[in-house]
Image (tube, grey):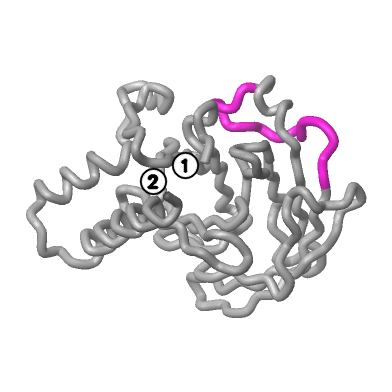
Amino acid sequence: MLTDLRARYRLVGAVCLVLFLVACGSRSLVSDVFSAVYSDTFNASNDITQTKLNPDYRYLRVEVAGANAALLVLGYLDATPQGDVEVWYSSKGEVIKLQNGRIVGTAGLTTDWRRVSYPIAPPAWTAIPVDGLQFTRVRDESPGYRNAIAQTVQLKPWAGLPSIPLAATLPTDVARSYDWYQEVQTGSPERALPPSWFAVDYRDGKRTVIYSEQCLSVSLCLKLQLWPVEKAKF
């Protein structure tokens, strides 16, 4: 079943890439595919909760300060030894790759992490000690083609609900039911990014990041939320 699911998502991803990279189809065909797969056009009030979703697909709500939230669709899963990489697409061509809830690649944003790797993989969310731990993250970034930027990240559990402005769609009582973790970059203060936050819950027998706040630069911070959160069970 998982093989069939991955095959279906890979097919969707392939179709999307063809539409993005090859302008050979009719405009109506592109519109039909986008309307079937994506849903980031909201009503007049920009109320994402009123957006009609296709139950055959998985969605990720993405919010950036100063812009309306958008929904991305899961294109496919890319299996790796460190865990599946989820490849999410927007109707405008942006791509966000997530692995265990962390951003490991983007395309089409004002700042892109073209590739992220870990010399030693961060531990599973079930294996993080109460006093935290450190790991190294290496990324390639654009614009500027800055490659192999290595940074030490401090990861620790967070007791209770963090004092951060959550997405309007994440009710406080729901947020309190999650386990929260904070990641802070250490060293290199001139290039330090704001802390990242991860809300983790049990879904289908495994720990899954339901909501996160992650910054690609000091000025580009993303709020990522599985959508709809009540039914976001993999």
Q: Is residue 211 visible?
A: no
Give residue 90's position: percent from left, percent from top: 36, 49
The residue under label 1 is 60
Name the residue beneath numbered marker 2.
73
Residue 179 located left or right of residue 32: right
Q: CA distance from mark 2 to mark 1?
A: 6 Å
> In terms of secondary structure, what is the magenta stretch mainly?
loop
- The residue shown at (24%, 66%) is 21
**What is the quadrant of residue 49 in the picture?**
top left
Segment colored magenta: 157-171
Say which amino acid is labelled 1: Leu
Instruction: Check if residue 165 falls in the magenta segment.
Output: yes
Query: In the picture provided, is 91 more to the left or to the right than 200?
Result: left
Most extreme residue toward the front, as rendered?
A: 1
Q: Where does the image place residue 233, in percent across and percent down from the top left?
A: 53, 36
On whether residue 24 falls in the magenta region, the answer is: no
Residue depicted at x 20% and y 47%: 33
Neighbours of disc 1 within 10 Å: few (<14), some (14-19), many (20+) = many
Label 1 sits on a secondary structure element that is strand
For the point 62% across and 79% down, the residue is 148
- Above or below 126: residue 122: below
Which numbered marker is on residue 163? none
